[in-house]
Image (spheres, grey):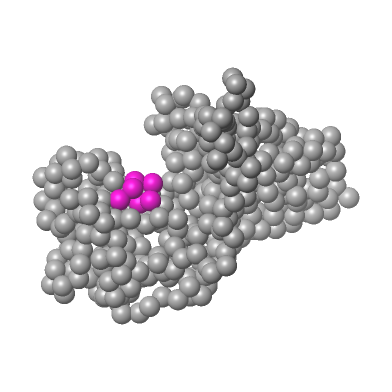
Amino acid sequence: MIGIVFVFSGFVKAVDPVGGAIKIGEYLASFGLDGLLSFTGLLSFNLSAIEFALGACMLLGVYRRYVSFLVLVFMAFMTPLTLYLALFDPVSDCGCFGDALVISNWETFFKNVVLSVAAVTVFIHNQRMFQCFTFRAYWFVALYAYLFGVGFAYYNYNHLPVIDFRPYKVGANIPQLMEIPEGAPQDEYKYTFVYEKDGVKKEFSLEDYPANDSSWTFVESKTELVKKGYQPPVAAFNLYDGEGEDVTEEIIGNPGPVLLLVAPKLEEADDRRMDEINGVYDYALEHTIPFYCVTGSSPEAIDAWSDNTGAEYPFRMADEVLLKTIIRSNPGLVLLKGGTILGKWHYNDIPSEEHVKEVMNRRLLESKVKNKEGGVLATNLSTFAVPLLLVWLYDWLRFRRKRKEKK
């Protein structure tokens, strides 16, 4: 069980290394370690690769004693950490499974308690783990699993995640994601009112507070969330023009195609693909397709970007966190039509005019997206499994040959 959890955790982190870096940055900031923020990308790559490699080695019985010890040390560190997160809530969720499976801090802690018990058990009985390879192949399996994790994360970093676990995936309709179904449970609150009389303070509920008793003096009111109601996948999606006017409906309510160059921070945006981006902008102008650059940067940063790149397209403003959630690229290109996301591209994969036209003329259905992601998942799993299978076959044949020679 624990090996499967580690493989899954490492894999989904490697699918979205940018998201992992953002989460690690939240951790570092909450603990006052701002000086390490420049290493968040490196930490994200290595954390996903190490988790994946430990899980793979555990499942395959490679370096059983050392791997079971490392897993035990890992859980001995993570369990107290997640207890602290559950008690003081410095970050909203631990991010242990990326965006693939978001669980609360208390759920994460209890999950880690179970895994810690499993880690202790495996460490004590590590020699009972089934070995799929002989000792001579251990080094290859462990190194290959780690390098595969790094390489897979690097690919997703330089392109968009091969599987999009966030709400803004291709095929998603943004207005529908913001809808609250009729009859959905609402947030439930407990209201407490504090009144004072003769120097004594007393708490009252909404039903029995002394509204008509002038002998009581109101001090304060308290509001406590008792039960969380339904939360739509997209809680807020707001875009603004340079004057601060909300232009959201102008973009997601447009029945025709709209192209958005999304750049959460223009100060950090990569400008090496400006010829390709400007080519798409020229195509949009030629075919009267609205084209906007949406950013969370200041007007000064927008002016600097325009001066450096020669950008002539209009700008719209949005929350930086929202933009990072929409696309893991700075900048990245998004194609909308009627509020539905038809295409997303990393700045390393800016499409040609023909590709934009092709995507624009076909409405991608969610089922097609899921089939595509399933195919990508199968391809990556086979990429990892086939070399290991070949090494296992060679290792098994060599081991059998040596046994015959000894006889």
x and y percentages locating residue 247 in the rendered image: 25, 60
x and y percentages locating residue 360 in the rendered image: 30, 75
Q: Main secondary structure of the magenta part?
A: helix
Q: Nearer the viewer, residue 360 or 140?
A: 360
x and y percentages locating residue 8 in the rendered image: 63, 51
Q: Nearer the viewer, residue 208 or 249?
A: 208
Which picture quadrant has residue 253? bottom left
Residue 269 falls left or right of residue 312: right
Q: Nearer the viewer, residue 89 or 222?
A: 222
Residue 203 falls left or right of residue 281: right
Q: Residue furthest top?
A: 199
Which picture quadrant has residue 42? top left
Residue 156 falls left or right of residue 223: left
Magenta stretch: includes residue 320: yes
Which picture quadrant has residue 106? top right
Seen at 49% across and 43% down, the residue is: 20
x and y percentages locating residue 273 in the rendered image: 23, 54
Seen at 67% across and 44% down, the residue is: 107
225 up-or-down from 294: above or below: above
Residue 289 appears in view:
yes
Seen at 88% across and 50% down, the residue is: 407
Seen at 59% across and 25% down, the residue is: 197
Q: Residue furthest right?
A: 407
Residue 142 appears in view:
no
**Which region is colored magenta?**
318-323
Q: How many marks?
A: 0
Magenta stretch: includes residue 128: no
